[in-house]
Image (spheres, grey):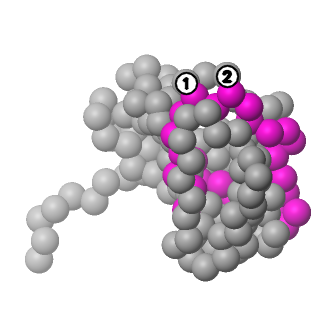
Amino acid sequence: MSTRRLLAFGRVNDSVYVGNAGKDAALDRGWLLGHFKEPGDPRHSEALEIKWGVHPRADERAQWVRGEERTALLVLISGRFRVELPGRSVLLAEQGDYVVWGRGVDHSWFAEEESVVLTVRWPSVPGYAVGETD
């Protein structure tokens, strides 16, 4: 019999947070970790940001990100998701497909089917939200 303690969801202490990406993402436009979390929260980071993006079919970014200052990795969990980059379109169609783009690369996106994507970008800097979507 295991003597390990099961951790509850939520903040366990100053350095541990246990959650569910689908549930927690709904609280902050999909973002699970980054500069926008309260200082002292284990999910606060100025080094990187992580987003669990759940997108209905035909969901698209309201406008292109221009003057990008971060590097980003976007991984397809499910669905079909297109990332628009200058001069090319990248279609993520199989679970695990991913695209990485660096600083200075403008981008946008479109969900060809209901999609779930995981985005990691670094560093975590303010100023990229577009209304209620990002």
Give 32 or 80, whichever is nearer the viewer.
80
Q: Residue furthest front?
A: 87
Tell me the residue that label 2 is attached to: 127
Disc 1 element: loop
* Residue type for callout 2: Gly
Tell me the residue that label 1 is attached to: 125
Quarter of the image containing the N terminus? bottom left
Question: What residue span does the magenta drawing correspond to?
Answer: 51-75
Residue ID at (50%, 56%): 20
Q: Which mark is residue 22?
A: none
Q: Position of residue 95 (x, y in %)?
A: 57, 76
For label 1, count other residues whose C-alpha is less than 10 Å away and answer few (under 14), some (14-19) or many (20+). some
What is the C-alpha distance between the residues marked 1 and 2? 7 Å
Is there CB contact under 8 Å for labels 1 and 2?
yes
Residue ID at (39%, 39%): 11
Q: Is residue 44 left or right of residue 59?
A: left
Q: Is residue 9 left or right of residue 83?
A: left
